């Protein structure tokens, strides 16, 4: 045998080649397999059949990266200079602040990404193969191209195989293609441009054999498999920064340049006034420290962490903190269909029997529901054709149902599970029929014939053949049918086909059922027995139905101004039908674009289709990825939901990826930013609600913190320009910016959601973090804070001559004003105002706000009254009169805040 290499393998479209050509290219024999000598050569050439996991960052590196923030650079350098000057206490406090920030970020950061490792574990299994003419079992990692693999029901496919023999082989590829029904496999060549879901002569790594047997030759292993290609797509996908992180980075850089510029100006002006460079360095550091919102990163992290906790209580687990806020800003949700919007359980919904159409209630495999005729429940005993149709579906069946953890599941084919379930709804079960009906023989389903047939003995006398299969295969073999009374009449094929078209238009998968009485002595079945004289019993139409709660969630998202798009590997007709039922296009006709159509479009046409379309069917994994990228290029904030391996690259590329926790594959979970523990699309609505609340609370935190920095920095800058003593020192600034700010801002993270939060459209993704309204607010409150600090300091310094008391009273006056300002932007403050006016407002739990304000008062008392703090922060104890002065001068903040709120629509 001639040795082959990887380049040779990737040149071929295996699904388009005849079996002989495949084995010739691979130098293999379908009867004897490879020789041991050839196996050794190829293992050395191709390596192991496994996916290599990407190495994550070490814990130390992830911790050090917490310091990789522009604003923290200034603090680290300032601390180093303080240490160089021998001011170790000051240096220690400044470095302590940066360390606290780093620890908070490190603790909250999600673990390193391990999506590729999850992919690797998803395809590891044992395989039955043929080598040297012998059948043996080996680990899937030992497979090489050219190996002959034997498949049987229940097997996980270990590598990409070109099938060379099949017998009733059906494979569930939903993890790769999104199609919920197992695919019937054969060995015939298919078109070269066939999409993954239509390559019926291929078996792909990671999929599952649900029925039949088969033999295939390995054509790809490891990263060369379709699953491996997905892992490479995930590695190639850009790690997008979330809108929040992008805005904070831009804000931080801008603030950094402004601070460095003004600090340098302060230093130069001070030297020009004849001050020493040490004094001016203290002033420059004080300005820099006052302008940097040291507490903001910690407050943002804490706010996001609290959002994570709230979402967890609503069945959404967030793996990456910024994803909390990102979801709140989502403008488009791209949802997978199977198992996300739908139940992932085939369900019979329509039955046609005896020239009458019946509706079936209930979803999934649980035997809950009833059969209706004209919206009235029926007694199956009064409708013989219906009873016979259901009996045929139950008996011509090789699957069964079982309960696991309280949930009904099918063991076998999902379609057969649906047939068992609908029969069970009228208490027609295998157990109830076993005493009188026994199976004698069976013709399993084969793609060539498109039907399955079973021979049964009835009460040890009559023998009946029951048949189920495609409409075309069954109808042409029928000469008669049962009418509504159960009497035989000539079959009306045209009427039956009209009914099939109606059901197919609704996205239903339609099966036909028939029967035939045979001799009591017949012990076996042959295809000739089925060729004619069948009695048509009816049709059963089934679908993987949409979740009822998901329908409501889609409507809620649309009301909130969020576009919802379906991206699936399933058939276009089925996807469009599900989308119509769910109101994707506001209950107008839905146009479904297929992957093949998208592939033929030019860029402008493609961009328009993606922007305007709501359903994308039969799409390959890379096309899902491109759809997400195209939406992002239009400035959309994209959330992508999914549960299969095929969803993983798009989940990773999206601004926020959302995986299903129960039905979802480990691959999807590891690629996602958020996991829904109840696999319920409705939980996304709750998560969006929480995300919007988090963003609103973040804006409140910014609006609360930055005015203090503004007031402090203006105070220091003007003091230097006027050659006055500093009203506030760098260490005192750090106390206000870290301890005081965090104690008062953290309660904002617990602010309950507003009643109008889901009635507003998504915020503009291009909206700046500091909107014009927010900038005006910060500027006005900063001016007031500057007047408060500077005015109180100058007044008390003149009246007492004690600079420590003057600084202490300036700080305490500022904190009093901050408390009033805090109340003005919270629901608690609004409730107090409404109560004064005689109105009542529901504000939710305000425990955090009460604790925050109480903690602030206690901390400020310690700050000025404890001797240790006096020495550390250069403060002085205050008497009762001085405390009252601080309280009175802070009162005007109520008037200022009220005026500002009136002109700011966000508060």
Image (cartoon, rainbow, N blue to C red):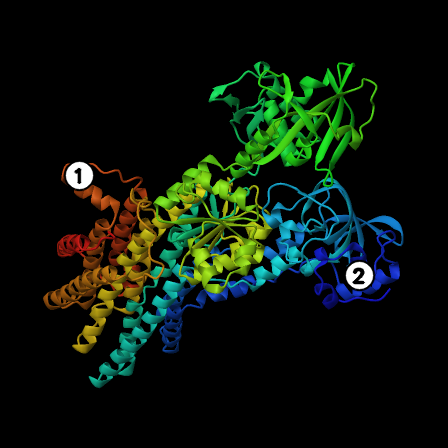
Q: Is residue 549 left or right of residue 847?
A: right
Q: Is residue 320 placed above or below 720 in the rendered structure?
A: above
Tell me the residue at 40%/65% (across/down). Answer: 98
Other residues around mark 2 within 10 Å, as few (<14) / some (14–19) / many (≥20): many
Q: How many marks?
A: 2
| Left or right of 899 in this view: 458 | right
Q: Is residue 99 above or below residue 308?
A: below
Q: Quadrant of residue 347?
A: top right
* Residue pictured at 72% horizontal, 32% vertical: 452
- The answer to whether any part of residue 322 appears in the image is no
Q: Could you say which disc has been placed on residue 26 in the image?
A: 2
Q: Which residue is mark 1?
A: 835
What's the distance in space between the residues labelled 1 and 2, CA to CA?
A: 83 Å
Mark number, residue 199 = none
Viewer-proximal residue, 287 or 702?
A: 702
Q: Is residue 5 visible?
A: yes
In the picture, measured across the screen, residue 200 lies left or right of residue 859, that is: right
Q: Quadrant of the N terminus?
A: bottom right
Instruction: Describe the element under mark 1 as helix, strand or loop.
Output: helix
Q: Secondary structure at mark 2?
A: helix
Q: Residues within 10 Å of mark 1 (few under 14, many from 20)?
A: few
Q: Nearer the viewer, residue 74 or 52?
A: 52
Residue 791 location, x and y as percent? 14, 65
Q: Position of residue 217 (x, y in %)?
A: 78, 54
Say which label, 1 or 2, has the lower sequence index: 2
Answer above or below: position of 497 versus 712. above
Residue 679: x and y, percent?
51, 41
Task: Answer above or below: position of 748 versus 682.
Answer: below
């Amino acid at each position: 045998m001639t040795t082959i290499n990887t380049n040779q393998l990737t040149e071929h479209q295996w699904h388009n080649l005849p079996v002989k050509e495949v084995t010739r290219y691979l130098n293999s024999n379908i009867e004897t397999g490879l020789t041991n000598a050839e196996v050794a050569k190829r293992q050395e050439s191709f390596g192991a059949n496994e996916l290599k996991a990407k190495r994550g960052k070490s814990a130390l590196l992830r911790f050090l990266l917490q310091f990789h923030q522009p604003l923290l650079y200034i603090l680290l350098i300032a601390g180093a200079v303080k240490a160089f000057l021998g001011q170790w206490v000051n240096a220690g406090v400044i470095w302590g602040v940066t360390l606290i920030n780093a620890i908070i970020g490190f603790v909250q950061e999600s673990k390193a990404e391990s999506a590729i490792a999850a992919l690797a574990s998803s395809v590891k299994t044992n395989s039955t193969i043929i080598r040297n003419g012998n059948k043996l079992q080996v680990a899937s990692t030992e497979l090489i191209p050219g190996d002959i693999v034997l498949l049987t029901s229940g097997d996980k496919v270990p590598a990409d195989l070109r099938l060379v023999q099949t017998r009733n082989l059906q494979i569930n590829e939903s993890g790769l293609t999104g199609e919920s029904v197992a695919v019937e496999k054969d060995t015939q060549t298919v078109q070269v441009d066939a999409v993954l879901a239509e390559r019926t002569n291929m078996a792909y790594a990671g999929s599952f054999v649900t029925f039949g047997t088969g033999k295939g030759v390995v054509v790809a292993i490891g990263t060369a498999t379709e699953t491996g290609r997905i892992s490479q797509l995930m590695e190639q996908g850009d790690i997008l920064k979330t809108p929040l992180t992008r805005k904070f980075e831009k804000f931080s850089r801008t603030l950094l340049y402004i601070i460095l510029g003004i600090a340098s100006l302060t230093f130069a002006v001070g030297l020009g006034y004849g001050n020493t460079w040490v004094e001016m360095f203290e002033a420059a550091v004080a300005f820099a420290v006052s302008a940097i919102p040291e507490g903001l990163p910690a407050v943002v992290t804490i706010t996001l962490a609290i959002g994570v906790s709230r979402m967890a209580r609503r069945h959404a687990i967030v793996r990456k903190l910024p994803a909390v806020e990102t979801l709140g800003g989502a403008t488009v949700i791209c949802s997978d269909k199977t198992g996300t919007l739908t139940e992932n359980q085939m369900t019979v919904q329509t039955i046609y029997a005896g020239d009458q159409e019946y509706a079936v209630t209930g979803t999934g495999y649980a035997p809950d529901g009833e059969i209706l005729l004209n919206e009235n429940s029926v007694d199956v005993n009064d409708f013989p054709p219906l009873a016979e149709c259901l009996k045929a579906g139950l008996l011509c069946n090789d699957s069964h149902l079982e309960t696991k953890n309280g949930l009904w599941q099918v063991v076998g084919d999902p379609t057969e599970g649906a047939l068992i379930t609908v029969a069970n709804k009228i208490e027609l079960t295998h157990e109830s029929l076993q005493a009188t009906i026994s199976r004698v023989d069976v013709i399993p389903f084969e793609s060539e014939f498109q039907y399955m047939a079973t021979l049964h003995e009835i009460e040890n006398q009559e023998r009946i053949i029951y048949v189920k299969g495609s409409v075309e295969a069954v109808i042409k073999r029928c000469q008669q049918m049962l009418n509504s009374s159960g009497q035989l009449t000539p079959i009306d094929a045209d009427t039956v086909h009209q009914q099939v078209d109606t059901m197919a238009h609704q996205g239903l998968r339609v099966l036909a059922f028939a029967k035939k009485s045979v001799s009591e002595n017949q012990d076996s079945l042959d295809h000739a027995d089925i060729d004619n004289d069948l009695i048509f019993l009816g049709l059963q139409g089934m679908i993987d139905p949409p979740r009822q709660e998901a329908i409501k969630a889609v409507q809620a998202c649309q009301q909130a101004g969020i576009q919802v798009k379906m991206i699936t590997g399933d058939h276009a007709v089925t996807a469009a039908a599900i989308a119509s039922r769910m109101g994707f296009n506001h209950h107008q006709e839905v146009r479904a674009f297929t992957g093949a159509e998208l592939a033929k479009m030019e860029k402008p046409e493609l961009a328009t289709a993606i922007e305007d379309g709501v359903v994308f069917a039969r799409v390959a994994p890379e096309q899902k990825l491109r759809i997400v990228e195209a939406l992002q290029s239009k400035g959309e904030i994209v959330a992508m939901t999914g549960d299969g391996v095929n969803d993983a690259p798009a989940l990773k590329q999206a601004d926020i990826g959302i995986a299903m926790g129960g039905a979802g594959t480990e691959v999807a979970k590891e690629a996602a930013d958020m996991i829904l523990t109840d696999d319920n699309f409705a939980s996304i609505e709750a998560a969006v609600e929480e995300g919007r609340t988090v963003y609103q609370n973040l804006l409140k935190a910014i609006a609360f913190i930055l005015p203090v920095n503004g007031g402090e920095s203006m105070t220091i800058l003007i003091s230097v320009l006027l050659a006055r003593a500093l009203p506030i020192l760098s260490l005192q600034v750090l106390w206000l910016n870290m301890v005081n700010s965090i104690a008062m801002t953290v309660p904002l993270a617990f602010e309950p959601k507003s009643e109008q939060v889901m009635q507003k459209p998504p915020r503009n993704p291009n909206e700046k973090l500091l909107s014009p309204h927010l900038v005006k607010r910060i500027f006005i409150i900063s001016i007031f804070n500057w007047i408060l600090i500077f005015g109180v300091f100058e007044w008390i310094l003149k009246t007492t001559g004690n600079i420590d008391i003057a600084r202490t009273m300036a700080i305490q006056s500022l904190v009093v004003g901050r408390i009033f300002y805090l109340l003005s932007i919270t629901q608690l403050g609004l409730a107090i105002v409404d109560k004064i006016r005689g109105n009542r407002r529901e504000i939710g739990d305000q425990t955090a706000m009460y604790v925050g304000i109480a903690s602030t008062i206690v901390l400020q008392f310690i700050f000025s009254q404890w001797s240790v703090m006096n020495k550390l922060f250069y403060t002085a104890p205050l008497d009762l009169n001085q405390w009252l002065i601080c309280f009175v001068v802070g009162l005007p903040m109520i008037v200022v805040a009220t005026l500002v709120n009136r002109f700011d629509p966000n508060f």
